[in-house]
Image (spheres, grey):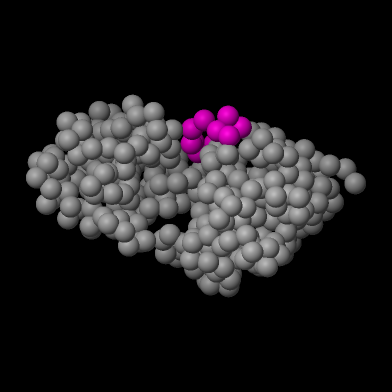
Amino acid sequence: MKTVTVSAGLAVVLAVGLAGCATASPDADAGTATTPADVVEITNCGTTLTIAAPPRRALAMEQNATEILLSLGLADRMIGTSYQTDPVLPELADDYAAVPVLADLYPNREAVLDAAPDFVYSTFTSAYSPEAAGPRADLAALDIPAYLSRFACEDPATGESAVDFDGIFAEITEIATIFGVTERGEELVADQRGRLDAAIAAATAPADTSLLWYYSGTATPYVAGSGGLPDAISTQLGVTNAYGDAEQTWPAGSWEEIAARNPDVIVLADLTRGGDGDSAQAKIDYLRSNPTTAELDAVKAGRFITVSGSSMDPSVRSVTAVEAVAAGLAQLTDS
């Protein structure tokens, strides 16, 4: 049995070639997956994963991984999901309802092993902590390939240095290759690229427009710095990330510093976990009640744009965030 080796960075380039050598036939229909004749071997965050056959009992450790699998039509190959942070995308709701939820947050190692997965997928390193599924090496020793997003590698040097949309699409393509549904991956990426291009073309904000991406916290606000998805979206839309000079992806800001930067627009993460200042409305209420932030131009003018919290992390929601911010900027520019 021949082994197909796929480099994570070249997954998009190799997808067409793998469609021919890693599948026995094209997808017959949306509900039937093909069966590759070859083993798929990839280098993922510096670790070699060998997938002997397309996974049939996949476990997604949080919502972003879940929605990628569901968008590829793989609900019938999933034995579990966990860590839902937002209402699932409406178009995926029916499929999501058919997948068992193993835990509100991360399932522990015992729960993971009891589910008997043949593949584990996470978009965050924390899923492989000892308190959750356990280290990927331990799962590999049990013949369970454990995949980690290229944007969250245990050793950052083995992954992507910054989030970009090519990397997101490469990850989708790689997951589709692992599951033997390369055509579905190509279709999903083509749709996402088309939507991204349309959103960028519709962007009308002046180039000197600055955006503060406000994720969470009131006493200490956490905002988007360099290297993350909000920074990539700002670049795509031709505007400035107000904290783009910060070295961290999600730095702890201060209201005095934010007041000094005085962003033109504030993008609010609408989080549903129920913490202090998590929802978009709670953030707006705080910004208007805090004497320091109440004087911000964006607050006085009501220049707010709301996106779901999970869309600020790389996933199939990333393009949705671009569309929402582009539309919001166009509305604010026209008003």
Q: Is 245 placed above or below 252 here?
A: above
Q: Is residue 91 visible?
A: no
**Magenta segment boundaries in residue numbering:** 155-166
Residue sitting at 23 percent across and 57 percent down?
Answer: 282
Give the percent coordinates (x, y) of residue 218.
24, 49
Give the percent coordinates (x, y) of residue 160.
55, 33
Q: Is residue 162 magenta?
A: yes
- Along the line of sight, the residue nearer the viewer: 262 or 205: 262
Q: Quadrant of residue 133?
A: bottom right
Is 1 left, or right, of 85 in this rendering?
right
Farthest residue, direction front: 130
Give the percent coordinates (x, y) of residue 158.
61, 32
Q: Is residue 110 visible?
A: yes
Residue sitting at 80 percent across and 41 percent down?
Answer: 4
For the C terminus, the quadrant is top left
Please tell me how many numbered marks the rendered image carries. 0
Q: Is 162 placed above or below 199 here?
A: above
Residue sitting at 37 percent across and 54 percent down?
Answer: 308
